Amino acid sequence: MPKDTSIRSVLLIGSGPIIIGQACEFDYSGSQASRSLRGEGIEVTLINSNPATIMTDPVTADNVYLLPLTTESIETILKKHKIDAVLPTMGGQTALNLAIECEKLGLWKQYGVRMIGVDTAAIDITENREHFRALMERIGVPMAASKTVTSYLEGKKVAQEFGFPLVIRASYTLGGTGAAFVHRPEDFDKLLKHGLQVSPIHEVLIDKALLGWKEYELELLRDKDDNVAIICSIENFDPMGIHTGDSITVAPAMTLSDRTYQKMRTLAIKMMRSIGDFAGGCNVQFAVSPDEHEHIYAIEINPRVSRSSALASKATGYPIAKIASKLAIGYRLDELENPITGTSAFFEPTLDYVIVKIPRWNFDKFEGSDRRLGVQMKSVGEVMGIGRSFQEALQKACQSLEIKRNGLGADGRELTDANAILESLANPSWHRLFHVYDAIKLGIPFKKIHDLTRIDIWFLKQIEDMILTEKEVEKYTLDTIPDALLFEAKQKGYADRQVAHLLDCLESEVYKKRNDLGIKRVYKLVDTCAGEFTAKTPYYYSTFEEENESIRSDRPKIVVLGSGPNRIGQGHRVRLQLVVHGVLAAKECGYETIMINCNPETVSTDFDTADKLYFEPVFWGAHLRHHPARAARRRHRATRWADRVEACREDAALRHQDHGHAVRSAGHGRGTRALQQFAARPQDPYPKFAGVNTAEEAILTSRELGSRCWCGPATCSAGRR
C-alpha cells in the first residue's frame, strides 16, 4: 500500500507554550514530522502559539500561523486553505484536546478534513479513565483496582471501599496535573476536590496504589496493515509513585526478565490494536511487581507521539516522529527506509549501549516550594548520558546536569548526616540519587535503603560497585595507580576531574597521565542495530575502548556547543536562535558542523541537524581534541567552556577560534569588572556600578552607590541567585 495520494495538504497542530509536562520535545516531533511530510510533496500548514520554536520558523512549513490554539483559529485556517487532513499527534495533549473540540463542533466534517495518525474514538478511550478501564477488562489486560468518580460523595465511597493508600488521577490533564498519592484519610478530601477541579470534564480515576512496583514504558509504531514494531523499552530507576517525567529512566530495560518483556510486548500490541484502527505512534506504560512473579498491570496508553518519544528517538537513533508521520499518510512499515542504516523501517532497534535520562529541576527559583517528588511532574528539563554500561551512562548523565557536581560522587560534596540521608530517601526530591550514593558510602544497610526507596537492588549494587572502585583508587597516588585501575575508572564513566579528586592531584595531570598510557577517548556510532548493518548517520557517543568509529575529515569545521538541559532563563528560544540557525548558516558557508550537547528534547540533537552529533556532557573535556575546530559559543554555559579552551590555546593539538564572539568580549558582557573598564568611555553612558567578590566589599560599595542597589551575579543566566 503506497502513500494515500488524496492527501495533498496537511494541517499540523503544535503544542502551544512550553509548560511542565509538555516542553520542547513536541517541537522536535512537530518539526521532524513537517519535514517528513514536505519531503513527500505534501503542503504543510502549521498552527502554534509559541514563537520560540523551530516548528514556527518559516523554513519548517509551507504556511505558518502564530495564532492561539482555539477552534476559531482552526476555522480561520480552514477557510483560507484547502486542507485534506489534520495530524494532531505531534502536539501533545494540547493538540489532541483541540482536535477533539473541533470534531465535536463538526469543523472537520464541514470542511472535508480527515484526522490522520489517530482517531477520536482512540483519544476518548485513553483519556476517559472509566472507558479505558472497561476496555482493558474486556481484552484481558490486568489493571489495579480502580473506579471513576465525578463527585466528592462518589470519591468518598470509593475510598472507603478500597482503603489507603490510593492514587487520584484527573482525566484529560497533562503532566500528572491533579494526580496525587493519598496515604492518609485526612489528606483525601483536599486532593480529591483538587483533582475534580482541574479535570476539564470534572472526573477522576481512583485506583489502589501500587507502591513500590517497578514502572516501564514501551514506544510502539503501527501501520494501516496492523504491523506493529516496538521501538524502545524504558525502565524507571524510581518505583511507582514518582511521575515518569521526574524519574531517572534507563534504556533498554535492565532488570526485566525476557519472559516478562515478551509478555509486556504482547500486551502493548494488544492494547494499541484495541483502542482504534489508526496508523502512527503510541506509548504504553506498565507496572511490574518487584518479586519473582513479575505480575504486569497496565497503567495507561497514549495514542500519539509522547513526551518520551523524543528520548526514545535519541536513545535508539530511530526517528519515531518522522516514521509515524509517514505511516499516517498510508505507508507500511516495510515500505519505509530506516534513514540511519538504509534497511527497512520495519525492525525493532537493538542497543549495544545503555542510556540514562536524569530530569533537571529549578526549585532554587522558587523558595518555599514543595520539592518532594510524586505523581505530578515538576522537572523543567532533562539530560541523557550514553555509555557502554549503566555505570558509564549514569556518570555522564550526572556530569551533564550542571548542578555544581563533578558527577555522581568523587567531588567531596557528599552528605554525611545519616538522619538527613534517611529523611531524604523516605521523601524523594531532586537529589535522591546523590543521597542513595551517600547512604551506600556511609554504610547504611542495603535492606534499609531498599525499604525506603523501593529502588531495585540491581541498581543499588551498580552504585555500590562504583563506590568500591573509588575506594580502590584512593589507595594510590597519580604515580602509583595501576594502569588497569585507571582504565577501569574511565570505563565506568569517571571524569578526569573526579579521578583527580580521588588521587589528590590536578585534572590536567590525570589527563596527561592517561594519554601517556594510551587510555584515550574513542567514539562509537548510535546505529539502531548493534553494528549488524553499516550506519550512515554520524551520531556518536564517547567511551574508553580500542576502536574509534568517528573518522576525522579534512573539511574545515565549526563546533557548536550546546547549553545542556532546559531550565528557566535558558530554554528553547536559545536552541532556535543560536543553534539550529547557526548550524544551517555554517553549513551554507561550507563548514562541517559538529554539535556537542546532552539534551534529548531538542531539535539541535536530531541526527540530521548537524553533520556530526556528539551526545556528550557539555563541560570541559577532550572532545575538541578529537576534532580540532572553530567553536561557535552558545549561551553562558558554552561561553565558560570557551574560556577553558582559550586558556589552553598553547596546546599544539588544539587550535580554537570562537566564531560566536571573541572570548574577551564574552568577559566584557558577563564579567562585571571587565564591563566596568570596557564601558568607562564618555560616549557610552551607564549607571554607576561595581564588581565585588566579598561581603565586605559589597557593604562598602552599597554605601558609595546609595541605598537602592541591585545585586546580580556575573556569568550566569536569568538572574540566577
Image (cartoon, rainbow, N blue to C red):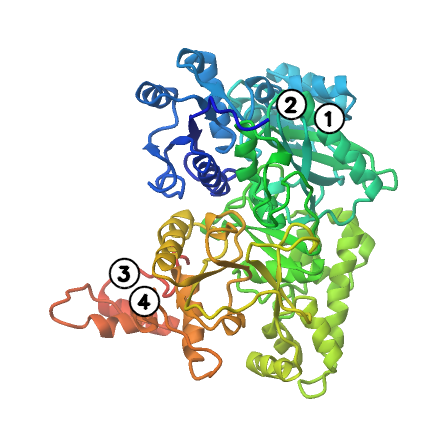
Q: Earlier in the sequence, mark 3 or mark 4?
A: 4
Tag 1 or tag 2, which sits nearer the N-term?
A: 2
Disc 4 residue crowd, few under 14, some 14–19, many 20+, Cα 10 Å: some
Question: Between marks 2 and 1, how big is the CA–CA gap?
Answer: 23 Å
**579 relative position to 505: left or right:** left
Q: In which quarter of the image is the N terminus?
A: top right
Camera-nearest residue between 474 and 507: 507
Secondary element type, mark 3: loop
Amino acid on which disc 1 is placed = Lys
Residue matched to label 3: 709
Label 1, secondary structure: give it. Answer: helix
Q: Going from the N terminus, do you reach mark 1 or mark 3 first?
A: 1
Mark 3 or 4: in front is 4
Question: Can you tell which mark lies on residue 680?
Answer: none
C-alpha separation, residue under disc 1 versus residue under disc 4: 55 Å
First reached walking from the N terminus: tag 4 or tag 2: 2
The reply to whether dot 3 and dot 4 touch (C-beta < 8 Å) is no
Percent across and percent down for residue 575 are 41, 51
Which residue position holds label 4? 661
